[in-house]
Image (cartoon, rainbow, N blue to C red):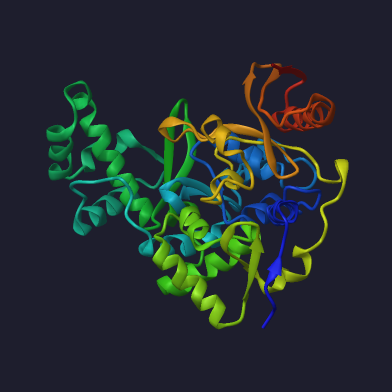
């Protein structure tokens, strides 16, 4: 057994930054980045694309991410799709490598149900929807499901929505059908038609994708092992928070890893219950590099590093958490330096210009941080393929 490891706060932050590809050790490809962090949260596409790109060598562009999702070459012909955007952990959209899709679908059977309540389509209804969608054989809009919505699901929304939302009952009901089919691994996002979201069936877009039967707990153990490789050291509460599982189940999956001698206990100040993979133990006690050896990063909103731990104390002052994790589940983009949040930021774009607007927090220091922000903002400009950049720091 590996003896317990003691870290100071800087070593903990450095280990997590290195594990999450936020140092100069980046992934070789966008697919490798998505695989390593077990998917990039992608409820909003733009932050997810930047989150993958900043973890990848060579500065991939937004267009490159879209191409891997669409599977189209420069001439627009269909090719092998190397990324997929669909629902995953915490019941939110993520961008995965396709091989991870079946694992997430299997694992979510052990995660608590989402906030969606009320009448659900029956299995026979969903089977009928699938048959009709397969007959159509092309990406579809939510509107295209209106004639497939089960009557009892529509009645539920007509009865329960507030009066001002009742005209949208059919859209809500069709959305429930989409969500149920996605939860079973049948469909994914397929880009947009104008401003409207398109969806595609797995049988159409990933016809040759292996879809093995997976045991639920064993699959979750595998995901927890990968989580620790990307986010460790971490606690059972962190694991549960990241997956959207309950803590008891998370402890059980970690217990399986402990039984196979894959875990080492980590002590860091007053934090309790931290563990890491034994395979990473040799790197945990390394000293963080000085100065610019630990690069500043412009982290996008909803980024996986902001969603990866229940305990935010290592990354953010308690007094400033509400400036980052805001009401209505809104998570701000942040400036991260030496593993700590020093500012929040937003961006505006026109056809020619990217404007990055930085709101400093208490740890911000212009002498230390401005040059790094300028460098990262330039990388973001190149990612977005815009010719001009404006930086506005309050």
Residue 253 can be seen in this image: yes
Q: Does residue 260 lie above or below 51 as drawn?
A: below
**Does residue 71 appear anywhere in the picture?**
no
Q: Is residue 158 above or below residue 120?
A: above
As drawn, is 35 to the left or to the right of 123?
A: right
Query: Dividing the image into 4 quarters, which one contains the N terminus?
Result: bottom right
Q: Does residue 38 appear left or right of residue 54 in this picture?
A: left
- Front residue (pair 351, 128): 351
Q: Give the position of the C terminus as an image quadrant.
A: top right
Residue 226 left/right relative to 102: right
65 over 289 or under it: above or below: above
Q: Position of residue 272 (x, y in %)?
A: 56, 61
Residue 338: % across, % down? 75, 43
Which one is nearer the viewer's eye here, 171 or 373?
373
Write the residue at 72% across / 61% down: 7
x 77%, y 32%: residue: 376
Image side of residue 129 versus residue 302, left or right: left
Q: Nearer the viewer, residue 236 or 346?
A: 236
Position above or below: 174 against 311: above
Place of residue 248 in the rendered image (x, y in percent of width and height, measured from the top left) = 40, 66
What is the total number of numbered labels drawn onto the structure image? 0
Residue shown at 64% from the left, 16% from the top:
350
Residue 323 image offset from top left, x and y in percent: 55, 29
Which residue is located at x 56 percent, y 39 percent?
318
């Amino acid at each position: 057994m590996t003896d317990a490891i003691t870290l100071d706060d800087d070593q903990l932050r450095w280990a997590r930054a290195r594990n999450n590809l936020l140092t100069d050790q980046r992934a070789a490809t966008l697919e490798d980045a998505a695989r390593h962090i077990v998917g990039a949260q992608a409820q909003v596409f733009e932050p997810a694309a930047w989150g993958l790109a900043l973890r990848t060598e060579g500065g991939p562009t937004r267009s490159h991410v879209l191409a891997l999702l669409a599977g189209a070459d420069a001439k627009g012909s269909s090719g092998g799709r190397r990324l997929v955007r669909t629902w995953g952990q915490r019941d939110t959209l993520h961008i995965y490598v396709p091989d991870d899709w079946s694992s997430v679908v299997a694992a979510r059977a052990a995660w608590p149900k989402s906030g969606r309540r009320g009448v659900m389509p029956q299995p026979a209804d969903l089977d009928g929807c699938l048959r009709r969608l397969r007959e159509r054989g092309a990406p579809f809009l939510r509107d295209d499901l209106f004639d497939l919505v089960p009557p009892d699901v529509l009645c539920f929304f007509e009865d329960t929505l507030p009066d001002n939302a009742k005209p949208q009952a059919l859209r809500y009901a069709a959305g429930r059908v989409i969500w149920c089919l996605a939860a079973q691994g049948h469909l994914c996002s397929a880009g947009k038609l104008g401003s409207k979201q398109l969806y595609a069936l797995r049988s159409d877009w990933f016809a040759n994708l292996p879809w093995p039967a997976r045991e639920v707990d064993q699959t979750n153990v595998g995901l927890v092992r990968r989580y620790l490789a990307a986010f460790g050291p971490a606690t059972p509460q962190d694991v549960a928070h990241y997956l959207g599982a309950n803590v008891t189940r998370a402890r059980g999956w970690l217990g399986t890893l402990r039984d196979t001698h894959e875990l080492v206990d980590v002590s860091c100040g007053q934090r309790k219950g931290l563990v890491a993979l034994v395979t990473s133990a040799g790197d945990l006690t390394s000293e963080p590099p000085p100065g610019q050896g630990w690069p500043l990063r412009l982290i996008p909103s909803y980024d996986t590093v902001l969603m990866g731990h229940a305990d935010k104390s290592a990354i953010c002052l308690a007094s400033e958490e509400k400036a980052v994790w805001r009401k209505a589940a809104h998570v701000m983009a942040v400036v991260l330096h030496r593993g700590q949040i020093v500012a929040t930021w937003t961006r505006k774009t026109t056809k020619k210009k990217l404007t990055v607007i930085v709101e400093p927090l208490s740890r911000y220091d212009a002498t230390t941080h401005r040059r790094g922000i300028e460098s990262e903002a330039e990388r973001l400009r190149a990612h977005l393929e815009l010719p001009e950049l404006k930086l506005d720091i309050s």
